[in-house]
Image (cartoon, grey):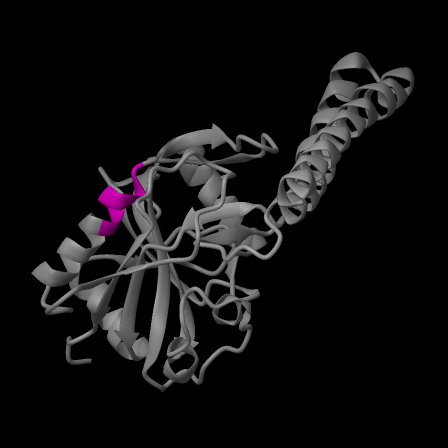
């Protein structure tokens, strides 16, 4: 019975893919091509496919294939799998900020039209922007609460960076394999000691996402190395003293970017005095 359900799920996804290709090629493009110059028709078709149709179709496909599985990574604004969760720190917001400041990392600006434009210019001109904003990824039903970064060779195109989501310690006592742990959307109070669940990766340049072909930062596939780098910096700065290793949820088969991860999450208490 389980095998039959799996086959039906995959058949449904294949049908969904065929319908999507037909919609993009024979409806969107042909309609645009009959009304607009060819080059503009291609651009309009790409925009509609990459930013409207494909994200929604893939989100639907993932819901079909991954029903009842527990995520071990963040979610993009389009509902697609994003960066793996690989670091967790216990402490206050003040301690978290002080810890990354001691490491020489900068807090990311909030994403806005102004910061996005500044980031685009910095990226094209390859000029420093140490507090460049991050795109929004989601965990516990909300975007990241805070993010930190460290530029590589003073370039906005390459950087170490990590996003954090705050989770109350009471909620964190639940098993990480419990779906309720990941479904929580409540944000703890600003001044309390919480569990900061983080997703750290290293940006290496510019690329297109594998599933929707949207323009994004290219990232180093080895998120284990980035996790170890961040932990090493925290230890070196005296922000943490000991580290425990825990497992995230079950691995899921699809990723927006290709990552190599062992699924381990480094957990530590922030010890720096704020």
Figure check: 201 above or below 99: above
* Residue found at x 87% / y 18%: 30
Prevailing secondary structure class for the magenta stretch in the rendered image? helix
Residue 175 colored in magenta in the image:
no
In the rendered image, is residue 130 in sight?
no
Asked if residue 212 lies left or right of residue 89, the reply is: right
Asked whether residue 226 is drawn in magenta, I would say yes
Please provide percent x and percent y for residue 12. 74, 36
Q: Position of residue 243 (x, y in %)?
A: 16, 64
Q: Say left or right for 147 vs 57.
A: left
Q: Is residue 4 above or below residue 207?
A: below
- Observer-nearest residue: 145 or 22? 22
Q: Residue at x 23, y 63 (%)?
A: 100
- Numbered range of the magenta stretch: 222-227
Task: Return the residue found at the far front.
Answer: 1
Residue at position x 31%, y 43% from top?
223
Q: Position of residue 25 (x, y in %)?
A: 80, 20
């Amino acid at each position: 019975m389980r095998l039959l359900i799996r086959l039906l799920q995959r058949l449904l996804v294949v049908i969904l893919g065929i319908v999507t290709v037909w919609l993009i090629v024979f409806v969107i493009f042909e309609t645009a091509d009959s009304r607009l110059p060819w080059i503009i028709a291609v651009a309009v078709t790409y925009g509609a496919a990459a930013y409207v149709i494909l994200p929604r179709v893939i989100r639907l496909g993932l819901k079909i294939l991954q029903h009842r599985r527990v995520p071990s990574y963040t979610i993009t604004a389009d509902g697609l799998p994003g960066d793996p969760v690989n670091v967790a720190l216990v402490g206050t917001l003040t301690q978290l900020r002080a810890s990354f400041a001691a490491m020489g990392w900068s807090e990311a600006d909030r994403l806005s039209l102004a910061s996005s434009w500044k980031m685009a210019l910095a990226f094209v001109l390859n000029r420093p922007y140490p507090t460049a904003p991050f795109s929004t990824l989601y965990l516990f039903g909300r975007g990241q609460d805070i993010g930190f970064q460290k530029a590589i060779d003073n370039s906005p195109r390459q950087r170490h960076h990590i996003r954090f989501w705050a989770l109350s310690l009471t909620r964190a006592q639940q098993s990480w394999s419990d779906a309720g742990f990941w479904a929580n959307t409540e944000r703890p109070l600003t001044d309390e000691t919480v569990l900061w669940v983080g997703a750290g990766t290293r940006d290496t340049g510019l690329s297109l996402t594998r599933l929707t072909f949207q323009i994004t930062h290219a990232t180093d596939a080895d998120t284990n190395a980035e996790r170890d780098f961040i932990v090493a910096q925290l230890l070196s700065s005296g922000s943490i003293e000991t580290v425990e290793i825990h497992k995230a949820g079950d691995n899921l088969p699809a990723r927006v970017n290709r990552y190599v991860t062992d699924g381990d999450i480094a957990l530590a208490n922030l010890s720096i005095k704020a």
